[in-house]
């Protein structure tokens, strides 16, 4: 990708003791995502809903060595496959980096003239109710602009680490919100799931060692296509 970096990740989590309907109800409650997904989501709002199609606004927060805040809008669509399986896709339609967020002189930087940390973001969720809970798979494809050579040695590794950490927190927060338990307690209660997940996937929570930082060798048969 000339002048850009593509970040492609797949992660999976198992949420015990819940139904597919409960998972979808939580994820589609966009007006309250800021309470569930802080600090990554600072604000959230449903702009429009039409059946299984949603248009949403979120204020995203990224922080590692550097901090960036974005106003972003997404088109999200859900596709039921049967009573136990659903998948969704989320496409960014607008991403603008903020300067001086939450201050009186807050303003959006011109789109395409910012630091380039987040240029585009597409997400693909797959859900399957099975084994007394719901398997949640999240595939993320993000695009960032490459930075000047003088800063590349610092910033480019940072850009590559952000999606991994973001997916881990996102799945952990989803599971915790659904089960009302700590992520550690949930994971420890299901050693078979933990062992399977640690072997094949980037798994939330991020407390354990990641066994596979590249492409997964196993994909749950949730959607009718392979990655």
Image (cartoon, rainbow, N blue to C red):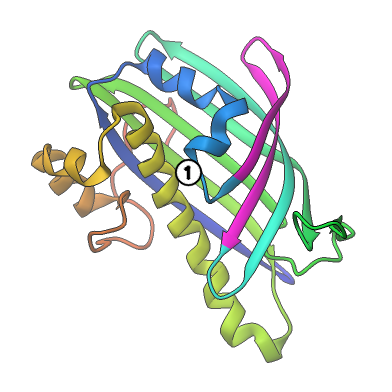
Query: Could you tell me which residue is drawn at 17 percent across and 45 percent down?
Result: 194
Q: Which residues are magenta?
A: 42-62
x and y percent of residue 29 in the render? 55, 22
Prevailing secondary structure class for the magenta stretch in the rendered image: strand
Percent x, y of residue 211: 24, 61
Q: Nearer the viewer, residue 207 or 201?
A: 207
Examine the rendering and report whether any part of residue 227 can be seen: no
Mark 1 lies on residue: 139
Q: Mark 1, residues whose alpha carbon is within 10 Å: few (<14), some, or many (≥20)?
A: some
Quarter of the rendering containing residue 86: top left
Q: Is residue 214 magenta?
A: no
Whether 154 is drawn above or below 108: the answer is below
> Image quadrant for the N terminus?
bottom right
Point 69% across, 30% down: residue = 45
What residue is shown at x 50% (from left), y 42% (from top)?
Answer: 37
Secondary element at tag 1: strand
Q: Position of residue 225 (x, y in %)?
A: 45, 31
Q: From the viewer's perspective, is 94 left or right of 152?
A: right
Does residue 215 appear in the picture of this structure? yes
137 relative to 131, above or below: below
Q: Residue furthest bottom?
A: 150
């Amino acid at each position: 990708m000339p002048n850009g970096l593509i970040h492609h990740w797949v992660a999976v989590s198992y949420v015990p003791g819940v139904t597919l309907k409960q998972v979808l109800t939580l994820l589609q409650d966009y007006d309250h995502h800021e309470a569930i997904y802080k600090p990554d989501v600072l604000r959230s709002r449903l702009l429009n809903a039409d059946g299984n199609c949603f248009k949403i606004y979120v204020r995203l927060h990224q922080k590692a060595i550097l901090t960036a805040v974005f106003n972003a809008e997404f088109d999200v669509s859900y596709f039921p496959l049967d009573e136990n399986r659903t998948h969704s896709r989320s496409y960014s339609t607008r991403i603008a980096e903020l300067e001086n967020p939450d201050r009186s002189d807050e303003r959006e930087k011109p789109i395409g003239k910012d630091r380039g940390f987040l240029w585009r973001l597409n997400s693909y969720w797959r859900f399957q109710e099975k084994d007394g809970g719901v398997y949640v798979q999240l595939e993320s494809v993000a695009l960032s602009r490459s930075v000047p050579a003088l800063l590349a040695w610092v910033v480019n590794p940072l850009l590559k680490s952000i999606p991994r950490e973001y997916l881990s927190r996102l799945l952990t927060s989803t599971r915790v919100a659904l089960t009302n338990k700590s992520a550690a307690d949930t994971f420890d209660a299901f050693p078979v799931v933990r062992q399977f997940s640690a072997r094949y996937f980037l798994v939330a929570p991020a407390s354990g060692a990641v066994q596979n930082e590249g492409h997964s060798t196993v994909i749950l048969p949730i959607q009718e296509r392979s990655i």
